[in-house]
């Protein structure tokens, strides 16, 4: 198994960043849950908003908020996976090819699990 080539100080730096971002996402998820509750209440009130020229429909708002929720959950999963890699000593190593992930990439995207070359290849192939 290839182990991280980052210093202990760098690993703690990224762990702190990831944990802070996870905390922000948890707070954001609480707001999302409140928004979903508001939309759910509006749906149960059976208001006819389909013809309301003043704003989005309930169905549109439900779709929008659930998409935001799904994105936040995906980000939490990515962060949890990165924290797991830190714990296992493999953080900063590409999970696809095993080479070190550039520090600049980790600075830009601390939850990155792929080096830039593998990320580009994957994106070019249309898979994610």
Image: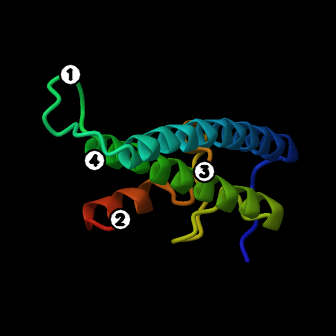
Tell which circle, 1 or 3, labels the residue nearer the N-terminal end.
1
The residue tagged 1 is 54
Mark 4 or mark 2, whichever is nearer to me: 4
From what the image shows, is residue 3 above or below residue 20? Answer: below
Residue at 38% x, 43% y: name it: 45
> How far separated are the C-alphas under marks 3 and 4?
33 Å
Q: State whether residue 4 appears in this view.
A: no
Could you tell which of marks 4 and 2 lies nearer the N-terminus? 4
Q: CA distance from mark 4 to mark 1?
A: 15 Å
First in sequence: mark 4 vs mark 1: 1
Secondary structure of the residue carrying tag 2 is helix
Q: Is residue 122 above or below residue 110?
A: below
What residue would you read off at disc 4? 59
Q: Are marks 4 and 2 in contact (CB under 8 Å)?
A: no
When asked about the image quadrant of residue 122, the answer is bottom left
Q: Secondary structure at mark 3?
A: loop
Query: Label 3: which residue?
Result: 111
Q: Quadrant of the N terminus?
A: bottom right
How many angstroms separate mark 3 from mark 2 (CA)?
Answer: 16 Å
Residue 89: horizontal and vertical position, in percent?
80, 64
Secondary structure at badge 1 equals loop
Horizontal side of 2 relative to 31 (left or right) equals: right
**Coordinates of residue 75 in the picture (x, y in percent):** 55, 51
Label 2 Cα crowd, 10 Å radius (few <14 / some 14-19 / many 20+): few
Q: Which mark is residue 97?
A: none
């Amino acid at each position: 198994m290839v182990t991280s080539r980052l210093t202990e100080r760098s690993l703690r730096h990224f762990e702190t960043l990831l944990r802070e971002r996870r905390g922000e996402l948890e707070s954001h998820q609480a707001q999302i849950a409140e928004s979903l509750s508001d939309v759910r209440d509006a749906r149960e009130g059976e208001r006819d908003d389909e013809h309301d020229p003043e704003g989005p429909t309930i169905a549109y708002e439900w779709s929008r908020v659930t998409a935001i929720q799904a994105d936040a959950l995906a980000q939490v999963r990515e962060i949890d996976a990165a924290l797991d890699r830190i714990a296992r000593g493999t953080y900063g190593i590409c999970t696809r090819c095993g080479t070190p992930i550039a520090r600049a990439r980790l600075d830009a995207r601390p939850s990155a699990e792929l080096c830039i070359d593998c990320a580009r290849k994957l994106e070019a192939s249309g898979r994610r």
